[in-house]
Image (tube, rainbow, N blue to C red):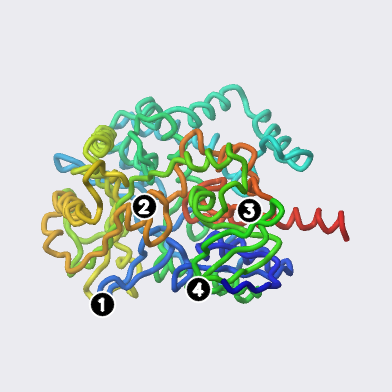
Amino acid sequence: MSVTTGDADVVIIGAGHNGLVCATYLAKKGLKVTILEAAATVGGAAVTDEFVPGFRNSAASYTVSLLNPTVIRELELERHGLKVVLRKIDNFLPGEKGQYLLGGRGGVTRAELVRHHPEDGPAYDRYLAELETVVPLIQKWLLKAPPGPGSGVGGLPSLLSLGRDVVGMSTDEIRILHDYATKSEGDILDRHFTGELAKALFGFDGVVGNFASPYSAGTAYVLLHHLFGEAAGVPGAWGHAIGGMGAITQAMARAAREAGVDIVLNSPVDEVIVEKDRAVGVISGGKAWRAPTVVANVNPRLLFEKLVPAGAVSAQAEGHFKRWSCESATFRMNVALNRLPSFSVLPGRGDHLTAGIIMAPSLSYMDCAYLDARQNGWARQPIIEMLIPSTLDDSLAPKGKHVASLFCQHFRYDLGPGRNWDDEREAAADAVIATVDSHAPGFAKSVIGRQIHSPLDLERRFGLIGGDIFHGKMGLDQLFSARPMIGAADYRMPLKGLYLCGSGAHPGGGVTGAPGHNAAKAVLADRGWWRRRTG
């Protein structure tokens, strides 16, 4: 092994979006930062592929809303080429017996609910009032480290801030917060709404990247997690990045390089160097990249099982990360189309084809998909959200042709004894296409090419352990002060000099940039303290 001594202040493992965000914040403060990326391009799971000649689409992550506006502004991503456009309709949910439901801004959602069940209009008002109680609290904590034991005096501001936020709430508001933090989304939605389509429209957010029934405890929080964002400056809206999700990370890479970050591609990290109980660099391709600070933008289980040497942290910490639960049961496809689909319940072209098209007409349908996958490995009638981004972005496909994203639940990583995804991925893809075709007859015949990412493919290509798109389940035991471990929720890992900036840290998954932002704050705070003590 050839060992060299580098002069970087910080080495970051992985040039996914959070790694790029973290690096840019650090470099803008004058630190010398190197990112080592295993792939031939930046972006992690937020990349755009040409998957059929002439047809391009986001490969894994596929839509914009959660990207934090502070990150967009402070990294000047729009100056670096990012352009986000809004869907003309937010959601389109085809149902049964000729019914459908639309969701959108300007009163569209409420009017649609009333069209089916008049009593669901006032119910929607009450539901929004509850969300307005809890979502702002979550938003306050997106760019803060959760309080936790082991923080010492430095953790007091976070603890006091949380106390102020909660103490300022009324008893009724605290009850609402408790419900959303602990209950199932089914409990919440059944309490409010009469219509099954209404419940399904809102309930989809609780099972996104979440292997659970809508009646599983904790799904109400996952629902909330998908509501705190905005797109193109519009709160709660969903949009499309022109050029696909890779346009976001390419803009981030331009910002990083402008700040002086050195991005080294095709350089998978093999090991974190530990000396005297401290991380002091990494090994990549037989070369040592030394730095007093190492920041990991990977799943915490991968970090501690594969990269941190055995014995470098306590047996308890090692055991915790071995048990870190990773299962989003996600199956991701792109398809090239020779024409737009036409849905039986709303035929022809229209703004509804720019929407997130949710094919799961009831909570009971979602529950059945979960139970089927739990028993049989994957759901034969899956939950699907389809986007057709070429309706908003003509750069993605030849004229007159289109691309569609298919984001599908529930498909388990572990199929059971004697079964593997290399054998079953095509059959699962066929089931997805057939499900769409049942809503839009002729869809299957319009497909001229497809890209398939099974849970195993997501792990192989993007390092998403267990195919988990969130770097770890967003369950009650793996959130807030317990993400990724009680005592390490402040981005400081149980090894000096090692930090976590990926989705396995608070506030969790999605293309938010928040973990990268927050990890950079932790690194800068520690360097400032060190300089005051020694300088």
Give the residue pinned by disc 4: 265
| Mark nearer the N terminus (1 vs 2) | 1
| Mark nearer the N terminus (3 vs 4) | 4
Q: Quadrant of residue 376?
A: top left
In the rendered structure, are the residues bearing label 1 and label 3 in contact, judged by CB atoms less than 8 Å apart? no
Of circles 4 and 1, the one toward us is: 4
Type of the residue with mark 4 = Leu
Q: Disc 1 to disc 2, how far (Cα)?
A: 29 Å
Q: Disc 4 to disc 2, how far (Cα)?
A: 36 Å
Q: Residue at x 32, y 54 (%)?
A: 456
Give the residue pinned by disc 3: 499
| Mark nearer the N terminus (3 vs 2) | 2
Is label 1 in a helix, a strand or a loop? Answer: loop
Q: Is residue 472 left or right of residue 147?
A: left
Q: Nearer the viewer, residue 201 or 425?
A: 425
Looking at the image, residue 65 lies above or below residue 179: below
Query: What is the number of the mark on residue 53?
Result: 1
Give the residue pinned by disc 2: 90
Query: What is the number of the mark on residue 315?
Result: none
Q: Residue at x 39, y 45 (%)?
A: 107
Type of the residue with mark 1 = Pro
| Mark nearer the N terminus (1 vs 3) | 1
| Mark nearer the N terminus (4 vs 2) | 2
Residue 210 seen in render: yes
Of circles 3 and 2, the one toward us is: 3
Is label 2 in a helix, a strand or a loop? Answer: loop
Q: Nearer the viewer, residue 303 or 486?
A: 303
